[in-house]
Amino acid sequence: MSLTTDGVVPESAAASTATPVIAVRGITKHFGSVQALRGVDLDVHQGEVVGLIGDNGAGKSTLVNILSGALQPNAGTILLDGKPVTLSSSLEARNLGIETVYQDLSLAPDLTVWENVFLGREQTVKGPLRLFGWLDRRAMILGAKADLDRTHVRIGSVKALAGRLSGGQRQAIAVGRAVAWGSRVLLMDEPTAALGVEQQETVGQLVRSVSSQGVPVLLITHNLPQVHKLADRVAVLFHGHVVADLRCSEVTVDDMVSWITGAALGAQPHAG
Amino acid sequence: MPLRLPSALTPPGTVTEGSGPEAEDTERSALLNAVDRFGDFWVLGVFVIMVLVFGLLSPSHDLFTRASWLNISQYAVEFLLLAVGQTFVIITGGIDLSDGAVLGFTGMVSGVVMQDLLSAHANSMLTTVVGFATAIFLGAGIGFVNGFLITRLRLPPTIVTLGSLTAIGAGATPLINGGNEVVNIPSQIGTIGETLIANWVYVPVLVAGVSCVVMGLVLHRTRFGLRTYAIGSNSVGARRAGISVDNHLVWVYTISGLLAGVAGMMVMANFTDASPLSGQNDELNAIAAVVIGGASLFGGRGHMLGTVVGTFIIALLVTGLVLVGVSGSWQEVATGVIVIAAVAGDQVRLRLAER
């Protein structure tokens, strides 16, 4: 259950000549007459934290859903480690190591922390009771502790009910379990929405810990100051295109805003 | 290892991120822990109090007799079996309103099958076995259909099981045997209902007890049980975790129907006939028992031990009121009041725990 890493400590400078862990080329998606994505190109490399920003309606959610296998693109390719793949379902995406942490976290509030961490991959005891799916609680409790320790977020007892934890701690559980599931790339969809400042810092910690374990992160967010701090690069979606791929160290938050609104392109500000 | 009680508040991770020693929150939670532990067992406390009250009020303390126990346990059998199945269903956030109707229907069909076999001079033992098999498979089959309609057609459980209840209870059952009781069933069945184990436990009570233990272990110790809670707590999350929610739900409703079939047989054993009236309105008591036992109708919470205590509270209520001399309809009133009190009390406790 432990995460395999390359043992390489990622540098924040781009390894842009190496094969990206995940890449998309020319992704197009329309819903009826609404064109959500008009040919998106994006790379995420080993050890990178890449932010995906854009205004509402720019196509962020659609792109995330396509990358996580929940939606199929109308055109374009998805490449994992340089090889084209088809993600016909979210299960397939997960089997290939693409883990998504959604905004609602998908945790079961009435279950304990360790039960949530192992949901879907519950460990059973060895021996005849295995046939009945008899749970190996002790192993899972210990395993959950280990998985969560790696996130460097204080959870307290893994026997606590998930619903009683703070937003930041629940993020930690969702992220900790995604990483433990053996992800090759982690997609985080609006992780700081509805979180207070202190807990947004927790999410920042989470992203850093994931990244330090070698797992690249694609961070979809509205939180520009945070993404500016955390990410190596930021891709800006505007009307279904990636209009800019910016090095965070070279731009300011204001620059990002102007790309999001299209002002940097000289576009007319639109109502709404 | 103690059974996990879903609503138990074990030391919460209330410490703010990255700060504060863990000793701090253990102190606070020890107190909260104690309050909640007590809170979880309040149903048991109510039960004990009821036993004492009825026992002392009954003429010559009749409640504390073996006869009384035999009476109550026999009465509780059909509700207990239904409630066990209902526990799983309610924990997933669903409900099975057709339980009682399935009990009656499977009993009647099984009875007619056995009656026909006996008139064809089939072996009595064999007839009994065939009768049992009929009831169980029929019950499971109806449960399967319920589950199928709920998951594939995406219909609310309330509607689907209400439909089953009507179609089976009001429609199909009166059609069988012309709506008359089936009396010509193998004597073995009556014997089963009358046999005592160790002089204290009727066989049907043992069957119900074993079902409780087995299903309780499934609920609290197996992957199937854990996923049942997960689906009730967050079905979207469960799906995203890779759990086949639809298949799981079909299983849950099938189990409920199967247990209703077993209950149908046990009722036949108790009365030595199959009656079209069997099981009517039983599902309400079964649901009440599960809710009194701590389950939430929204799903995600519930406990087999709680269900057992809830069932006995209702059985005790009915029998106890009779012993004390209170008339029949008041029992229904009392049951209703207790259900509301149980749910309200639970909500209050939850809100207090959140502070």
Image (spheres, coloured by chain):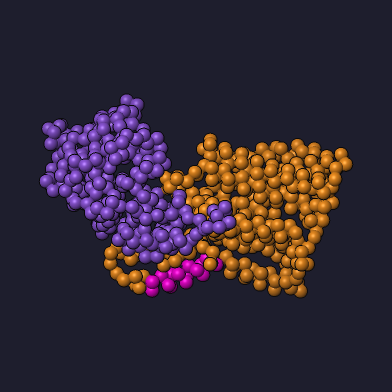
Note the chain letter of the orange one: B
Observer able to see residue B301: no
Location of residue A50 by image quarter: top left
Q: How many marks?
A: 0
* In the rendered image, the vertical position of residue B28 relative to residue A253, given as above or below: below
Q: Nearer the viewer, residue A131 or A162?
A: A131
Q: Residue furthest front?
A: A7
Which part of the image, by quadrant, shows the C terminus of chain B?
bottom left
Whether B3 is drawn above or below A4: the answer is: below
Q: Residue at x 79, y 56 (%)?
A: B192
In the rendering, at what x and y percent does residue A67 appear? 32, 39
- Towards the viewer: A208 or A62: A208
Chain identifier, colour purple: A
Assess whether residue B158 is covered by the magenta stretch: no
Residue drawn 29% across the image and 69% down it: B20
User: Which picture quadrant has residue A58?
Assistant: top left
Residue B332 relative to residue B33: left or right: right
Q: Is residue B35 magenta?
A: yes
Q: Is residue B296 left or right of residue A6?
A: right
* Residue drawn 24% across the image and 44% down it: A45
x, y (%) of residue A104?
36, 48
Q: Nearer the viewer, residue A87 or B201?
A: A87
Identify the main secondary structure in magenta: helix
The answer to whether residue A145 is seen in the rendering is yes
Magenta extent: B26-41
Q: Position of residue A241 (x, y in %)?
A: 22, 33
